[in-house]
Image (cartoon, rainbow, N blue to C red):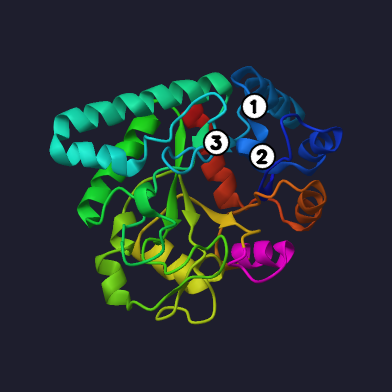
Amino acid sequence: MNRKAVIISIAGFNLTSNERKLIKKQKPWGLILFKRNIKTFDQTKNLIKSIRKAAKDNKFPVMIDEEGGSVCRLTSFLDNKVYSQSFFADIINKNKNLGLMLYQNYIRSMCSVFKNLGININTVPVLDLLDTNTSKVIGTRSYSKAVETVRFLGKFCIKNYDDNKISTIMKHIPGHGCASSDSHHKLPIVKKNLKSLKKNDFKCFLNINSRFAMTAHILYKKIDSKYPATHSEKIIKKIVRGYLKFRGIIISDDISMKSLKYDIITNAKKSLEAGCNLVLYCSGNYNESLKLLNEMPFIDDFTRKKTSEFYKFLG
């Protein structure tokens, strides 16, 4: 499997001829869809078919960021805005059996939609620990302020997605909940010490077995005062691979976000050098995508092996 270590995005509702050639010749690892790509159910289904035809791969990874609540991409034909992670956590807190049944049914229904469209990965669960004294960017996207609730529901979510043959990307490892600002706009700086982080934010991700994990563009000042997690070898190797024991594919958060200070090529290279296996590019600009794919290496043996395992999981 010869793929570049990049997940790309596209500009609109249909593949342009340039985008088709890009997928065919440059061989990105996968592709992520956003609201700008989704108009109707049938249009989206046909778009995904055309992506896989260009890739010559009927299992080509096509993912979406459909958390429910404040992060929804399917709103043109499916309104998920009420179904945030905190929505289900609140019901489960009041009546565990009822809440878990509803959450399980919701996941099953969403997986049915994804499979009918051709999507095989969703970027959930959000395992960031809620902290009401910090940035509101996580908010209802989190399950709870309680570590064990986040861990329990995160595992429940991953298992139910797995049972329905859709893969998950847990995020934002090793934890975005304590961030003082939104990493889409500027780099958040976290000043908590390692002991506190291990007890709280980091613990939410400890030994959680998702096939994929997405990094946080956050500077943990007491661990690495120079580089945010996505660019930090200390964070990726010592915390994510070491302490948290994550053994799946690590994907950077979007390398075009303003929290990363370099150009996209440098951001991508620094992500891979730090230990990310794949870089995510979400802006959908063809020229930037082409430039990025020209510069990026093919996936390494570890990522190739894990990708093969993912394909076997899909059946």
Q: Which residue is drawn at 44% across and 40% down?
A: 67
| Residue 170: image location, x then y, percent | 42, 48
Asked which secondary structure carries label 1, the reply is: loop
Give the Cα distance between marks 1 and 2: 32 Å
Is residue 107 among what the camera can see?
Answer: yes
Asked which secondary structure carries label 2, the reply is: loop
Amino acid carrying label 3: it is: Arg
Q: Which residue is drawn at 50% across and 27% down?
A: 314
The answer to whether residue 283 is left or right of residue 305 is right
Q: Mark 1 vs mark 2: which is more N-terminal?
A: 2
Magenta segment includes 184: no
Q: Which of 212 and 1 is in front in this view?
A: 212
Q: Which stretch did the figure color magenta?
A: 258-272
Q: Mark 3 vs mark 2: which is more N-terminal?
A: 2
Q: Residue at x 72, y 40 (%)?
A: 10
Asked which secondary structure carries label 3, the reply is: loop
- Residue 39 disc label: 1
- Residue 1 disc label: 2
Magenta segment includes 262: yes
